[in-house]
Image (cartoon, coloured by chain):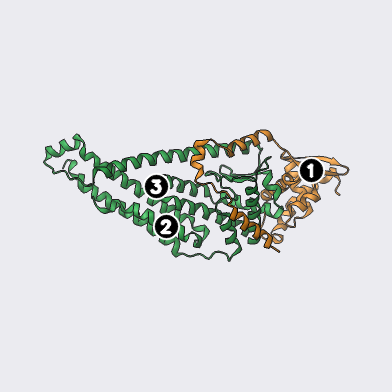
Chain colours: A green, B orange
């Protein structure tokens, strides 16, 4: 088996390292580049594991008998230990994906139930003092906030929260996050990419809110107040299905809002994408190599 | 103050005019639905029922009084807010729906069991002491 089967894993590490470094310099609207790269990496790495697992079939009597019958010299492309490890990793990945999906589904379902209990309309308010705001995807999407959050903000700051959550709903950020969560579940090496995307969609919604309200300073202030109120109310949970208003890296977001508006750097998203494409090419190469091992199984 | 009997008709009239007038006044155009959410949020944030004038103040952003009236009437017709007569004026308050149930559901959601937490834990961000200090300083630095 060629080295290409291991390349996606190596490139995943590289993508994760790059995500950490460049996330601060990426235009918030370019989160999709990271998502696509993560999906390609996760898919290629999974396919690599499938191929490595499949080499174990060479040990089964079925393939061995067939080879003997046809007079084919069976190769042992990878050590059996690697094949077994690949199987274990695949199983773990499947379990993690199932758990992520189940948690997301359950959380979305519960958020929708809370919204329904709050009545109709775009805005659903829960009479709780803990400050929270969620964008609840659906048809139509709704904004769920607690009274606690509304009461610590003034009118302009409340408009920021609404604009921020609307941006999440309108841009369907929950899909971007869901995709990277699944990728990170399949391939835990990609966890930093998931975090990068989570941060970028928040930044994107912040910038949208700033455009709507006409003031980045105002958004920074609303964010700060919400975060401090959350801190006072105890630990803040960030939910996978909902996009909390004050969640990922609040300090970094506030700092970004207080500095110059982001300038798009086309090189960053394209290099991230190139990395994803490279893993896909490696996966294709690995597949070809694997085919070389087994082509004799097909009747000529 | 507008006479109560004619308010609804006036409000309807304002609706059309109000929406035309909006783009020039606001940094970006606020659709009627967005204004409804803002007014509703202001009513929820308030400690007690508010008059239209107070709602206008609480919402901010230089809304016209008549626009606020229109939105209030619309929210009232949708059954999202209630009102009590206070002399010649109305005071508005949010209709709380299944308040207890919603609060309970939300509480449950925010304190899910171990399995859900395990999946969620990774995403958890709590405000570190350092972050809180930084943010407080930022808030104070503001003129």
Q: Which residue occupies 33% across, 40% down?
A: A88
Q: Which residue occupies 11% across, 41% down?
A: A71
Tell me the distance, in whole angstroms, between the alpha carbons under discs 2 and 3.
14 Å
Q: Are marks 1 and 2 in contact (CB under 8 Å)?
A: no
Q: Earlier in the sequence, mark 2 or mark 3?
A: 2
Q: Check if mark 1 and mark 3 are on a common chain.
A: no
Badge 1 element: loop
Residue matched to label 2: A17
Residue matched to label 3: A187
Q: Nearer the viewer, mark 1 or mark 3?
A: 3
Q: Which mark is residue B49?
A: 1
Tell me the distance, in whole angstroms, between the alpha carbons under discs 1 and 3.
53 Å
Identify the subunit bearing mark 2: A
Q: Is residue B9 left or right of residue A2?
A: right
Q: Which residue occupies 70% across, 55% down?
A: A156
Badge 2 element: helix
**Depicted A95 relative to depicted A255: above or below:** above
Q: How far across and down, in percent of the image, does residue B12 sit?
A: 76, 47
Q: How far across and down, in percent of the image, does residue A160 sit?
A: 65, 54
Q: Nearer the viewer, mark 1 or mark 2?
A: 2
Q: Give the residue at the far right of this rendering.
A: B87
Identify the subunit bearing mark 3: A
Tell me the distance, in whole angstroms, between the alpha carbons under discs 1 and 2.
54 Å
Q: Is residue A252 left or right of residue A193?
A: right
Front residue of A13/B89: it is A13
Identify the subunit bearing mark 1: B
């Amino acid at each position: 088996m060629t080295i290409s089967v291991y390349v996606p894993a190596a490139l995943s590490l590289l993508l994760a390292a790059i995500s950490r470094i460049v996330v601060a310099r990426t235009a918030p609207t370019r989160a999709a580049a990271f998502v696509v790269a993560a999906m390609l990496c996760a898919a290629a790495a999974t396919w690599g594991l499938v191929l490595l697992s499949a080499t174990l079939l060479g040990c089964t009597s079925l393939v061995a008998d067939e080879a003997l019958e046809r007079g084919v010299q069976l190769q042992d492309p990878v050590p059996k230990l690697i094949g077994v490890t690949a199987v274990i990793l695949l199983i773990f990945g499947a379990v993690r994906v199932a758990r992520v999906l189940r948690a997301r589904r359950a959380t979305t379902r519960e958020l929708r139930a809370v919204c329904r209990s709050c009545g109709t309309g775009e805005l659903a308010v829960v009479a709780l003092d803990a400050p929270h705001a969620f964008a609840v995807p659906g048809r139509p999407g709704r904004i769920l906030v607690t009274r606690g959050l509304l009461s610590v903000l003034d009118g302009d700051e409340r408009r920021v929260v609404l604009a921020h959550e609307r941006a999440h709903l309108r841009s369907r950020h929950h899909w971007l996050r869901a995709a990277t969560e699944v990728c990170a579940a399949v391939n835990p090496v990609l966890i930093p990419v998931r975090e990068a995307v989570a941060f970028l969609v928040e930044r994107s919604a912040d910038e949208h809110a700033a455009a709507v309200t006409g003031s980045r300073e105002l958004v920074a202030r609303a964010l700060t107040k919400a975060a401090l109120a959350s801190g006072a109310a105890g630990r803040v949970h960030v939910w996978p299905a909902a996009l909390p208003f004050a969640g990922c890296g609040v300090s970094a977001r506030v700092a970004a809002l207080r500095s110059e508006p982001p300038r798009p750097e086309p090189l960053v998203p394209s290099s991230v994408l190139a990395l994803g494409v490279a893993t896909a090419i490696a996966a294709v190469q690995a597949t070809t190599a694997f085919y070389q091992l087994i082509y004799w199984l097909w009747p000529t | 103050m507008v006479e109560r009997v004619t308010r609804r008709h006036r409000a309807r009239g304002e609706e059309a005019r109000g929406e035309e007038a909006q783009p020039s006044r606001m940094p970006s155009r606020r659709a009627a639905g967005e204004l409804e959410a803002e007014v509703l949020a202001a009513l929820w944030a308030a400690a007690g029922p508010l008059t239209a004038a107070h709602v206008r103040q609480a919402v901010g952003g230089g809304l016209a009084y008549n626009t606020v009236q229109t939105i209030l009437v619309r929210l009232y017709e949708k059954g999202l807010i209630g009102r009590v007569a206070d002399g010649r004026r109305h005071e508005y308050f949010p209709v709380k729906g299944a308040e207890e149930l919603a609060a309970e559901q939300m509480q449950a959601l925010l304190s899910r069991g171990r399995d859900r937490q395990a999946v969620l834990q990774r995403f958890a961000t709590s405000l570190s002491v350092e972050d809180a200090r930084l943010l407080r300083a930022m808030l104070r630095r503001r003129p």
